[in-house]
Each structure stands twice: as C-alpha cells, then as structure tokens.
Image (tube, helix red, strand yellow):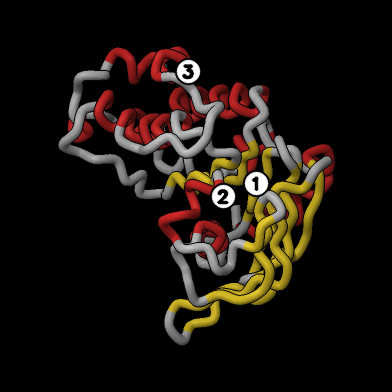
Amino acid sequence: MTTLLELQGLNAWYGESHILHGVDMRVGEGETITILGRNGVGKTTTLRTITGIVRARKGKLIFAGEDMMQVPLHKTARRGIGFVPEERGIFSTLTVSENLLLPPIVASGGLTVDQIYELFPNLYERRNSAGTKLSGGEQQMLAIARILRTGVRMLLLDEPTEGLAPVIVQRIGEVLKQLKERGMTILLVEQNFRFASRIADRFYLMDHGQMVSEFPVGELPQRMDTLHKVLGV
C-alpha cells in the first residue's frame, strides 16, 4: 500500500507546554485510521499539527511525498488535507447550500453538490436553512459534506460522533464507509471504538503524547481489556 501520510518523531508545543513527544504514524492511501486515547493525551493536537494549525513543531511530516513542515497553514488544504474540527466551524448565518459552496475547489475529483445530497439526504431537506437552525447531527454532516466538494485526498475528523444521537452516529458511519469505498483516506480521532471498529482498518493507541501501540481492526476483540483500562471506559 502506498503511504500517503507519514509522521516521524513529531513533536509539538502550545507555548511552553510540550504536548507531542515523538509521534510516529503511517497512513496508507485509501486507509481509514483511528487514533484512540483518553482526553488530553494529544489526539486533537496531532490532527492540528498535521494541518499546520499548531506551528511550534519539529520532526518529519510527509504528505504525498512532500515535506509539510514548512508549508503555510493556508496552503495545507490545497495540498489535499481537509480538517473537520470537533467544534465543526460551519458558518451559522449562511444556509446549508451556501456553506457547501463556500470552500474553494483545490483539486479535481471532489463530489458534486448533488452527490453530497445523495450521501446526506437530511442536508438536501434543510438546504435553505441557516446553520443556526440545524441540529448538532446536521451540523456535523454539513461540516463533513462541505470538505467533500473540495477534492481533498485525506479527511481528518476530530470526534465526529461526540454528543450525537445513535441514529446520526449510524448515518455518519455509513457515509464514512461510502467515502472509503470511493478511495478517500480518513484519519479520525474517536473515543467510541465500537463505532470506529465498523470503519477502521487500523488503530493507533495514544498516551502521554506518543503512540504506544498500533494494531489492525481484526485484533480489536483480544485487546478490549487493555483498551478499557487505558481509555477508562
């Protein structure tokens, strides 16, 4: 499998706080990878460092064969990395349709608006509604959907199921499966490893700013006791 993203000895800081302590990780083209770990161990910081939001960093960060460490934040998406933060970040005063059309196309191969509405029928029904009128689940769908138009090669998702109703969690899982079938590479941070087990190819377990283990989805059942202890669930 061709490696799309590789992290080697990645360190990151918020001010004087050293958060990532030599993160090593590889994501293959078309893979779905889930980072597991307790709150505060560096999962979100890993995503923010990959995208360039966290600039105090050192180590190797290679995407599609390019060293991304010196790439400015505003050019990261144009290299093919799309990020959906936990807070979603949709424009609340714009309609669903306006939110979908706002991000620029960065490469060919993105989904059309009609294809997005096929994936997210709820959004089609609410296409003329302002962001403030959407439920939490609909906002999450919109945050994911607007990235899909842009043509990015890799989708980063931070806690996509947090606080959502089970029926919405199920729908998001179905959408991610369909994106995987289309060849999208997905890296997600997720506490709900039962949800992640339905879509992930591999897992990385994170603790104290490092990846402490990596395993394929097939090994999940035999690792459940360890995961319960580490994750506190």
> Is 150 or 204 nearer to us in this picture?
150
Tell me if mark 1 has few (under 14), some (14-19) or many (20+) residues whose alpha carbon lies within 10 angstroms of its own.
Answer: many
Residue 70 visible in image: yes
Tell me if mark 2 has few (under 14), some (14-19) or many (20+) residues whose alpha carbon lies within 10 angstroms of its own.
Answer: many
Which residue is located at x 61 percent, y 76 percent?
58
Circles 2 and 1, Cβ within 8 Å, touching? The answer is yes
Quarter holding the N terminus is top right
Q: Amino acid at mark 3?
A: Leu
Q: SS for tag 3?
A: helix
Task: State the image coordinates of residue 105 (x, y, percent, origin top left).
Answer: 43, 34
The label nearer to you, 3 versus 2, is 3
Q: SS for tag 1?
A: strand
> Is 158 or 115 nearer to us in this picture?
115
Residue 108 vertical position relative to residue 219 in the rendered view, above or below: above
Q: Amino acid at mark 2?
A: Val
Q: Which residue is mark 2?
A: 189
Figure disc tally = 3
Residue 162, quarter of the rendered image: top left
Circles 1 and 3, Cβ within 8 Å, touching? The answer is no
Left or right: residue 133 compared with residue 80:
left
Task: State the image coordinates of residue 168 (x, y, percent, origin top left).
Answer: 44, 26
Q: Which residue is mark 3?
A: 119
Q: Which residue is mark 1?
A: 34
Left or right: residue 191 compared with residue 65:
left
Residue 83 vertical position relative to residue 72 in the rendered view, above or below: above
Which residue is located at x 58 percent, y 68 percent?
69
Which residue is located at x 67 percent, y 23 percent?
181
Which residue is located at x 29 percent, y 40 percent?
90
Left or right: residue 154 compared with residue 181:
left
> Is 210 or 146 nearer to us in this picture?
146
Q: CA distance from mark 3 to mark 2?
A: 22 Å
Residue 117, quarter of the rendered image: top left
